[in-house]
Image: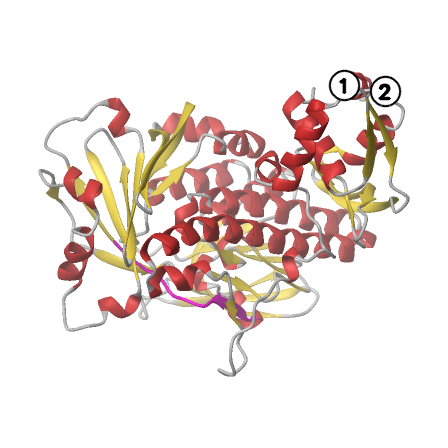
Amino acid sequence: MVVVGGGPAGSTAAKLLASWGHSVVIVDTQPPGRRSLAESLPASTRKVFSLLGQIDAVEATGFHPNFGNVARWAGKSRTTSSRVAGYHVSRVVFDRVLRRCAANGGASLMTAAVKRVTPGTPMLVQCQLNAGRPHTAGQTTIRARYVLDCSGRAGVVARGLGRVDVGYRTLAIAADWELEARPEMNESSRTFIESAKDGWAWLLPFSPTRRQCTVMIDPERATRRRGLTSVYHQELAKSIDIHARLESARQISSPWSCDASVYRALRTTDGGVLLVGDAASFIEPLSSAGVKKALVSAWRAAVVVNTCLARSEMTSIALDFYERRERAVFAQCLARSTAFFKEASDAYAGPFWDARAREGFSEPNGGRGESNDKRSTSSDEPSDPTEMDLAKDLAVYQAFERLRQAEITKFTASAGIRFEPVATIEGNEVVLLEGLVLPGHRRSIRFAAGISLPDLLRLAVRCESVADLLGAYCEHAERERLEAPRIEALLGALSFLVARRALVHDDT
């Protein structure tokens, strides 16, 4: 099969598929001098690297540690700290590390540009070798049963499947800086984020003294008769804390810009083509979750393709699973960034933040207006909520408080409960396992905070108290040789079932 693009998504998908015995070639242009924004990877990315078999290579590279964020947002200060370090990475170096992992895993790498993908069985992938060098360029065609478009914003194959944009655009302007003195560890290992009236900025450390500072603005402000350097410094001056931290620093690169606008593909699958990572959707850089999202998207795509090749009868189910999960993840990321944008909109009340706080999409309908797309978050299509999702859900919190205050709780299953199969990942395949259809929904859901909802519900109706239930589920996990559940996750999943009226409880 062919993987288009050798960034985090492409290298990860190729590594996994090759390690599972498939023939994989990564086609990547690797243009010289390619520049990209630096990345702040949270500590939670470590778990993903471990799952994907990349943790040793990433650790050996010695990326600068990331112990959290310091934000001055909408006039308020907040700090997020982590006891375990994440990573601050240069994308050029980071991408090289992951490509090496893919090659070590058995994937081949071809330096070329994909010009055309012709549908069929197999598909024909036409590549131009030595792209950009017309005197030495040649062409070759690769036959492939599946093509994974991991070419990022360029969307080599994705361009033909259509794209939906949010109702605003964002331009990122970045430059690298060198500090005169080595700051305290607390300063040198954190990302600084700051909002202003009509934009925002971040300051990310590459090393104890090297920084990349990026400003995010409306593109229209950079199209006036001013050079990029002038625009960059004018926007940087609007940030109070970040500007102060760079006052004695030396700028060591000229500013450069890239499109940082949010979008998603109308479809992420088309026959044997899957859009992966940024080719499927691009989320707000504010989240610092873009790379992690791309890695998980690549893992999911690799599992889906492996399933289709191993068990053809599961093809439509696996592809539908991939489509739904990609849409759901994008919707979750959009909702989280929109919450921050609403804070800024309330503080500044200007067009820059108001547009970002609306959470709307401009549909490609020939300019005949805008429409809000809520399909990925409709009540018809629930997705497995994480612990973080549950922690932010007011109804779940209220259910938790009621359970906490009850001395004895007897649970009864709602009359509207049904058990139906749901697609989920087990090992390196998509399988159908028992799921739970919540009242008012039509599709089943299996997990909340990593806890099996069908198992939890069945145990709940047999137990006399929350404490008994927690013990029963832990015993169940041990019998089934499952990972020991965290009590916080169990309480969150139980509160979720109560909040969604799947369980009714009597308090005494």
User: Looking at the image, which residue is at 77% across and 54% down?
Assistant: 317
Residue 75 screen position, x and y as percent: 30, 44
Q: Nearer the viewer, residue 143 or 206?
A: 206
- In the picture of the structure, the residue carrying the numbered disc 2 is 464
In which image quadrant can residue 467 be found?
top right
User: Which amino acid lies under the numbered mark 1 shown in the image of this protein?
Assistant: Glu
Which mark is nearer the camera, 2 or 1? 1
Residue 506 screen position, x and y as percent: 83, 29
Among all residues in the image, which is located at the extreme front?
508
As drawn, the label of residue 156 is: none
As drawn, the label of residue 407 is: 1
Magenta residues, start to end:
162-173
- C-alpha separation, residue under disc 2 versus residue under disc 1: 10 Å
Residue 396 screen position, x and y as percent: 66, 37
The answer to whether residue 356 is visible is yes
**Secondary element at image label 2:** loop
- Position of 72 with respect to 47 (left or right) is left
**Secondary element at image label 1:** loop
Residue 309 inside the magenta-drawn segment: no
- Position of 325 with respect to 422 (left or right) is left
